[in-house]
Image (cartoon, rainbow, N blue to C red):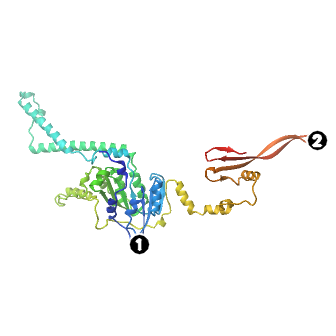
Amino acid sequence: MYGNEFVVNQSLSQYATKLLKMYLKFPENQKITALDWNARDGEFLSTLTKNATERFLYGVSDSKYNCDQMREEGFHKVSESHYRSEAKITNDIFSLMVVNPQIDSRIIDELFQTIDPYKMPNFREEVQDMVMRQEEEKQHLKDQMKQQIDFGELEDKESNKTFAEESEEEKQERINKQINTELQKRVKAWRMAIKEQQKKMQSMRFDGFLLQRATTYLRPGGILVMVTLKDLIDETISFKLVNQYENIKIIRLEDDEFLQSRKCIILAKKRVKPTREEYELAKAIARTKERPYDSFGKVREITASLEDEPEKYNKQKFRAKVDAIYEVIEPQVEPSYVVPESDPEDITSFRVGPITGSEALITMKKSKLIDTYREKYSQVLSNKEPVTPTPLHKGHIMLLLTSGFLNGYIGTGPDQHLVKGSAIKDVREFSETDDEGNLKVVEREYYNIGVKLLNGQGQFRKIM
């Protein structure tokens, strides 16, 4: 069952986005700033923050068309670049950060062959069958040995120990120990195989990189909205999440949408200070990929008693805590996350990737540089239809060309061409005889004058 790359990499549906919006509460009459690292046309971020009274939206997209769409929709700032490009942005400033990286087609083909590809096989049942078969074979062999001729004195004490009868409790304890040992080996081998597969896919993934980048620019108390495949929530993601964020929720989409895209939404609040004390929680979240999708929203009960079985109680309590992280998206009566305020004036720099031509034109239109240049240096540019005081002859035009005054575009339409004039000073030495017959060296200065033309067909011509 191969995934459709277009479906997997498109934005969340309007229905899912509106449900997700219900998880967020925005401050009244206060400014908030929100950045989407893979904004596409900006519709997702715009819908998600619709309840904010004063919102300033920032978007990154490598599509010029999408960037123009975001500007038309009123985005405060837009960068036309890929989210992997070098960025220069003010740290710890944004109220809300959206991370929704593109998923490589090779990863999609690898993961979408089955539902829950990382679901652990039932090794216990296999191991139990194997151990019980071995026990039956050993018992059968033991019975056969008893029926053989007794060699009396040839039997040593070790042989007697081997065939000594063991109690039923000892036998069951030995079998259980053997089952657990073999089970641990199989689970370890399976996890090692999964890790090898993850290493191969690591070069195709940028979700961990993008999560770290988003964390750098999100303010303490800010809200992270990360959209990614359930099968990619592993150590790459979990340790960054747990160290830098609290109140973590992993919300999967409804069945129909999830089975098409395998998408989960991670909601989390950035910590004021990072921590490394939640190692076990990070390990548990790293196994999200192993969790069956239909187990989301189900919290297992705590059956043990703290007084009678404290160790078992603590394990079940931690298990319930992990289970509570996983939910299925649904309407909310009260929002779970409060988006903090943030003033866009505090964002002193926002740049992702190099400046593009379209962005430069937008900046130039806002700048007074061109107008100042025209007023100071160019009478021709400030007058759309300049009229010469007297008609210019060919000699006049050549003087203007060679002086460089007419450098630039001349004419309009298909007849437009580019002219460049140059006058290069040179010095030559001559030997000559004066009136008295003496030979002397004389230096004379002269100018190499040239005029070149480039027409609309890309052809160069040298006029002089």
In the rendered view, tell whether residue 359 sits above or below residue 449.
Answer: below
Spot occupied by residue 21 in the image (x, y as percentages of width and height)? 34, 63
Tell me: residue 173, above or below residue 363: above
For disc 2, the neighbor class at 10 Å (few under 14, some 14 to 19, many from 20) is few
How far across and how far down the image is residue 116, in percent?
27, 48
Within-10-Å neighbours for mark 1: few <14, some 14–19, many 20+: few
Q: Residue at x 46, y 55 (%)?
A: 65
> Residue 133: x percent and y percent?
14, 38
In the image, 19: left or right of 463?
Answer: left
Residue 428 is labelled as none
Instruction: Provide the residue designation for mark 1.
Output: 29
Q: Nearer the viewer, mark 1 or mark 2?
A: 1
Query: Quadrant of the image for the N terminus?
Result: top left
Q: 179 or 14, which is in the foreground?
A: 14
For the image shown, how many numbered marks are present on the structure?
2
Establish if 113 lies above or below 237: above
Amino acid type, mark 2 = Glu
Residue wearing tag 2? 436
Residue at figure coordinates x 61%, y 52% from the top left = 413
Separation (CA) of disc 1 from disc 2: 99 Å
